[in-house]
Amino acid sequence: MTAKQTGSATRLGVTASWFAAITAFLRFWEVTLESEAFLLWTTIFTGLYLGSQVALGGRALRSLRHPAWTHAAIWMGTVALAVPAYLWLPDVRIYGREVPRILFTGALDVLIPLWIAVRALATTWNGTPRWATIAGLPIYSLALVWAFTIRMPGEPFSGTPPPLDSAELALKMNLERHVSILADSIGERSYRTPESTRAAASYIAATLTELGYRVDTMSYTAGPNRTLHYNLEAKLKGSGKLPDLVVGAHYDTAEDTPGADDNASGAAALLELARMFRNASPKRTLRFVFFSTEEPPFFGTRQMGSWHYAARSAARQERLYGMISIETIAYYSDDPGSQSYPPPFDLFYPDRGDFIAFVSNLDSADLLRRVIRVFRQHATIASHGAASPAFIPGISWSDHQSFWLHGYRAIMISDTAPFRNPYYHSPEDRTARLDFERMTRVVSGLAAVVAELAEVP
């Protein structure tokens, strides 16, 4: 083999290594969330960059004046600065929600590694091969995004749905009643209205008791005044020794809103799922859990009710099959342009807000795909799913995030809230604005999902 052939083989090997690294990066990016502010992938890609430069340049890297060392020093300097910057970053709100600061450093740990990869490929080739390789990188990345994030089993429902049957009409009436009591009668259930929050907890507990469940109350304190809050749990014992399935929803609201969609709709759906399964004999234990303190100023902190619950489960080394978070499921629109997305999802999904969304992080993708497959087999409403890195806005915005951070798989079911509902976190989030027929179709589909996951005969 000639020197030229050897050089080409080395460059091909380096290029293949970088494409393999990008594959691993896009699939396993979320491991960086376990390292807090440390830019893990930036560090890994800097090491790969130096390794590829050694493979290509050999002895030239013995000189500290080689450009590769300058680039590596800049990237590692950023890694060193990320930790104090993370500690000094102010709290930030997006669409009314406090966003955990780690997601901003996590986003940085996306941009820098991708730039390192582009830089490495640019120094690997010259001329036309260089530009062909760099142009192929975004195409390859989009293909991976489709494979890891967008691709879902089954086909979403389309066309005119059949009329609700008698059982579904009764379900619809129950859902309307629960939402009306929580949003209209009780109203705002925020950190500023502890009496209303306790009234909502009492209503939920009383309803579960009437259904025949024993309600376990997990009390904890949150907020500057250390106000007492409550998680409520109703269990349906399984006949086997399989890991438990948690189905949860928060019942508190943001301030200055009655919270009909966010999240009386989720709490109502969970109450009805508990009703539908009260006489079932599942193999897997079902836990119906109602959380408090999901909304600001608690969101993204260890004061969330779901954080307390997930932390306790992890401390007890409880085996959980997964967690399903039901979050804002009752607002829909058939108008063109009524649905928005964070980029690049607008390239892949419809612009009408007439569907229900299923989302998860990448580590929970297998659970997400199983759930949406079963849902599509039974539901009479369109559905779309995405298994995405958690730094994408909206992906982590509910109680499922707490379970991710304790090592459990979890997904969220949502109407996408601020990306569709113009009344999100406002005084106009009222019962009259909700579409209870479509909400009923969602809950019916979720019942089929819970039945399969819990292995109900």
Image: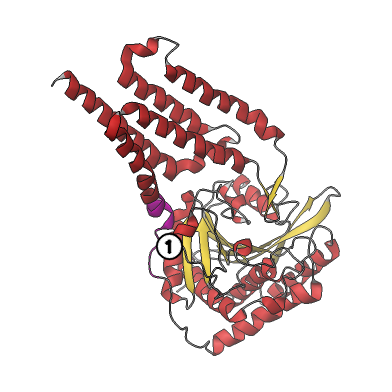
Instruction: Give the amino acid at mark 1.
Output: Arg
Mark 1 sits on what residue?
370
Helix, strand or loop under label 1: helix
Outermost residue on the top side: it is: 63
Q: Is residue 177 above or below residue 293?
A: below
Q: Residue 214: horizontal and vertical position, in percent?
A: 68, 68
Q: Is residue 4 above or below residue 154?
A: above
Outermost residue on the left side: it is: 1
Extent of the magenta region: 145-155
Residue 449 included in the magenta stretch of the image: no
Residue 116 appears left or right of 135: right
The structure residue drawn at horizontal position 70% and vertical position 81%, both measured from the top left corner, is 177
Q: Residue 107: horizontal and vertical position, in percent?
A: 55, 41
Nearer to the camera, 23 or 345: 345
For residue 36, say whether it is visible. Answer: yes
The structure residue drawn at horizontal position 81% and vertical position 50%, both measured from the top left corner, is 223
